[in-house]
Amino acid sequence: MYISATSGGGFAGLSEHYEVDTAANAAGRTLEAALAARDFFALPADATPEVVGADIPRWRITADDGGRRHTVSFADGGGPASARWQELLALIRAAA
């Protein structure tokens, strides 16, 4: 499975980008399990409620397992709605 995570926006307009090929990465099974635990491929494209503020970064996580490709976006407002995504981002960052 190929996973990418890209951020944009935020106060300084900085961006981050990470890519992981789970077949070639020691953390691959952990990442795949984290996506499965979130039922990633069944989630709506926008996974968090609209957050107002120009300084709030947005993330896009895309997973492609060869048969399916799905992208989920969320606002990283630091609240409970983005907490579960921060856990996944930490795994992706560590594996990239």
Image (cartoon, rainbow, N blue to C red):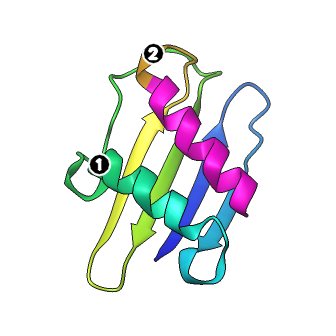
Secondary structure state at the residue bearing disc 1:
loop
Q: Please give the name of the residue rendered at 26% of the width and 50% of the height, measured from the top-left corner.
A: 39
Mark 1: few, some, or many residues within 10 Å (few <14, many ≥20)?
Answer: some
- Looking at the image, is 46 positioned above or below residue 18? above
Image x and y of residue 59, in percent = 54, 43
Quadrant in the picture for residue 32: bottom left
- Looking at the image, is 74 positioned above or below residue 89? above
Determine whether, in the image, residue 83 is placed left or right of residue 15.
left
CB atoms of marks 1 and 2 within 8 Å = no
Q: Is residue 84 magenta?
A: yes
Whether residue 58 is visible here, answered yes or no, is: no
Determine whether, in the image, residue 89 is placed left or right of residue 64.
right
Image x and y of residue 69, in percent = 32, 72
Q: Please give the name of the residue rendered at 65% of the width and 21% of the height, measured from the top-left corner.
A: 55
Give the number of callouts: 2
Secondary structure state at the residue bearing disc 2:
helix
Q: Work out whether mark 1 precedes mark 2 in sequence or the reverse, and give the earlier one.
A: 1
Image x and y of residue 85, in percent = 49, 36
Q: Please give the name of the residue rendered at 73% of the width and 64% of the height, measured from the top-left corner.
A: 96
Q: Nearer the viewer, residue 37 or 89?
A: 37
Mark 2: few, some, or many residues within 10 Å (few <14, many ≥20)?
Answer: few
Q: CA distance from mark 1 to mark 2?
A: 18 Å
Whether residue 44 is visible here, answered yes or no, is: yes
Q: Which numbered marker is on residue 19?
A: none
Q: What residue is pinned by disc 1?
A: 45
Image x and y of residue 3, in percent = 52, 67
Q: Please give the name of the residue rendered at 51% of the width and 13% of the height, measured from the top-left corner.
A: 79
Q: Is residue 87 magenta?
A: yes
Amino acid type of disc 1?
Answer: Ala
Magenta segment, which residues? 82-96
Q: What residue is pinned by disc 2?
A: 80
- Looking at the image, is 69 positioned above or below residue 60? below
